[in-house]
Amino acid sequence: MFPRIILVRYVRAFILELTFADGVRAEIDFQNKIAGRGGVFAPLQDVEFFARVRVEPELGTLVWPNEVDLDPDVLYSQATGKPIRVPEMA
């Protein structure tokens, strides 16, 4: 299991600094991840709304006021460049 996010800091338009439980810290640009996406992602295209991000403490991931959340394993992989580990089936 990948480490969970313990801290998020809004840096500037669509860029967040994430700190993970294992101490890894990285800035991630979310603009390409949300640009042009509709539905629940549409509000995130507004910079002021995007900046209202917080860490969901039980899941250790990012969440916005409209309850959009992002997979912490994917974010950790992006932050570190390490592939996501898939558990082997027995």
Image (tube, rainbow, N blue to C red):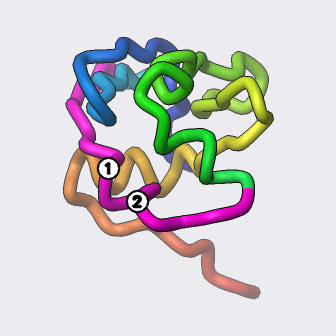
Q: Residue at x 60, y 19 (%)?
A: 55
- Contact between marks 2 and 1 (CB within 8 A): the answer is yes
Residue 36: in magenta span:
yes
Q: Amino acid at mark 2?
A: Ala
Question: Few, some or many C-alpha atoms within 10 Å of disc 1 (few <14, some 14-19, many ≥20)?
Answer: some
Q: Percent x, y for residue 78? A: 30, 54
* 60 vs 8: above or below: below
Stretch of the chain drawn in magenta = 23-39
**Does dot 2 land on a helix, a strand or a loop?**
loop
Q: Percent x, y for residue 45? A: 47, 44
Quadrant assignment for the C terminus: bottom right
Q: Percent x, y for residue 2? A: 50, 45
Residue 79: in magenta span:
no
**Residue holding disc 2:** 35
Left/right of residue 48 with respect to residue 54 in the rendered view: left
**Residue holding disc 1:** 31
